[in-house]
Image: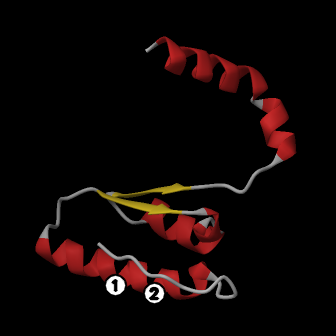
Amino acid sequence: MLARLQTSDVDPAQEGMDAIQQVVRKLRRAVPKTRIIIRGDSGFSNNELMDFCETTPLVDYIFGQAQNSRLEKLIETEMAEAKAAFEEN
């Protein structure tokens, strides 16, 4: 596992790619068949890192996305349904 704190003027993807590749290599040596899930905020949502995850066996990712009013409008109904289902439980 890896966690780093950086100032907001640093692009997380810039250093993140090298660090993530290093962690994945170390995990593969230790536990070769384990599924790895990389979680990051919207700063990690870039093509280079997503391509790496999608082309590396047993590596998946979950990245947050910045707010997007156009997307929010498109999924308005689904979000309302999800909220209602959550509140029921």
Callout 1: SS? helix
Q: Which residue is farthest top?
A: 88
Q: Position of residue 27 (x, y in %)?
A: 22, 73
Q: How many marks?
A: 2
Q: Position of residue 14 (x, y in %)?
A: 59, 86
At label 2, the amino acid type is: Asp
30, 66: nearer the viewer: 66
Q: Position of residue 20 (x, y in %)?
A: 41, 78
Quadrant holding the N terminus? bottom left
Residue drawn at x 59%, y 22% is 82
- Judged left or right of residue 29, residue 70 is right
Residue drawn at x 60%, y 22% is 83
35, 16: nearer the viewer: 16
Q: Which residue is farthest left?
A: 30
Callout 2: SS? helix
At label 1, the amino acid type is: Gln
Is the C-beta separation of discs 2 and 1 under 8 Å?
Answer: yes
Which residue carries the number 2 mark? 18
- Judged left or right of residue 30, residue 19 is right
Quadrant holding the C terminus? top left
Residue drawn at x 57%, y 63% is 41
**For residue 22, which numbered disc appears in the image?**
1
| Rendered position, 44 above or below 39 | below
Find the distance from the CA under tag 2 to the CA under tag 1.
6 Å
Quarter of the image for residue 51 reads bottom right
Q: Position of residue 23 (x, y in %)?
A: 31, 79
- Judged left or right of residue 2, residue 55 is right
Residue drawn at x 46%, y 64% is 53
Quarter of the image for residue 28 reads bottom left
